[in-house]
Image: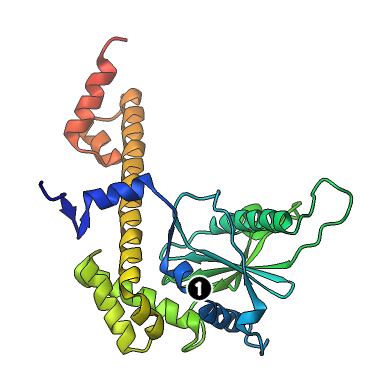
Amino acid sequence: MAEPEEKQGVSIDKRDSVVKHTIKDSVFTNLFKEKKYLVQLYHALHPERKGVTEEDIKEVTVSNVLVDDIYNDVGFMVGSTLLLLVECQATWTVNIIFRALMYLVQTYREYFRKTKQNLYKSKKLEMPEPELYVIYTGNRKTRPEEISLKEEFFDGKDICIDVKVKMVYDGRDGDIINQYVVFTKVCNEQVEVYGRTRKAIQEAVRICKDKNVLKEYLESREQEVVDMMMELYDEQEILKSYVESEKYDVAKETAIRLLEMGKLSVDEVAAAAGLPRELVLELQKELLQPV
């Protein structure tokens, strides 16, 4: 039987499995499934609160009905505080506020169900105090400490609801957040050298272990990490293709509008829309055909 066609170390069969999709961990969620790393995460976020142990942390399991993607959200409770974290990689977007909000709402729904609280009865609901975080691993120069729904989308107007998300960047030297961010950056550097391939991930893992970055985790989960990163790269390739197709659709619509105006030559329309001249000619023929 013929081997499946491959592109950058990823088989077509593999990419198809991503399209069909089952929810998968990212390294982010996989790392923090282990309580020994989760307690390190809590101390990185709250270094002033000493003495919290693994026994004090309760994981929050959310039924993922909101997204159809690689899963990179982490939720857990310490006492009466609910901490929700969303990972944002290279692309900065304030839209992540909505993802944090949806994740919070779904987490509360699960919490009320598990604690057998009824939203429709008169008794006041009891709920943990939320803290929302985004861990940003990209290279953006402007780094606000906090972003909010009110400020980003409604110019600071006093609207009926607001959501505030604390931004976390490089962490403190050597803490678990810092190690994770270093890991992502080393992965990106190796992708620049080897492309989105297993070789790139394997080199990133080797370098991080040598630098004592997530060393224990990587030594115990190396093959799993490689597989998860390949899934992520598959998803990114699919997203790239989707975005490119969206851009093509926009360019095509622009060309059609310009042709219908009848003020520009075919070459001018092609240049303005960013499309090949031959394609613009085909669009022109279609427009000239009688309905």
**Residue 162 horizontal/vertical position (percent):** 70, 58
Q: Is residue 62 left or right of residue 217?
A: right
Height in image: 222 above or below 275?
below
Q: Estimate how packed mark 1 is, as few (under 14), some (14 to 19) or many (20 or more) residues with alpha carbons within 10 Å.
A: many
Q: Residue furthest top?
A: 290
Q: Is residue 68 left or right of residue 65?
A: left
Front-lying residue, 286 or 229: 229
**Residue 257 horizontal/vertical position (percent):** 36, 28
Q: Residue furthest right?
A: 122
Residue 80 visible in the displayed image = yes
Height in image: 262 above or below 154?
above
Q: Identity of the amino acid at label 1?
A: Phe
Q: Is residue 153 left or right of residue 197?
A: right
For the point 59% across and 58% down, the residue is: 62
Circle 1 is placed at which residue position?
A: 32
For the point 59% across and 73% down, the residue is: 145
For the point 63% across and 85% down, the residue is: 53
The C terminus, quarter of image: top left
**Residue 185 horizontal/vertical position (percent):** 36, 75
Front-lying residue, 11 or 162: 11
Q: Residue furthest left?
A: 2
Residue 155 visible in the displayed image = no
Front-lying residue, 46 or 185: 46
Q: Is residue 105 left or right of residue 123?
A: left
Occupied quadrant, residue 205: bottom left
Element carrying mark 1? loop
For the point 60% across and 84% down, the residue is: 43
**Residue 259 horizontal/vertical position (percent):** 30, 26
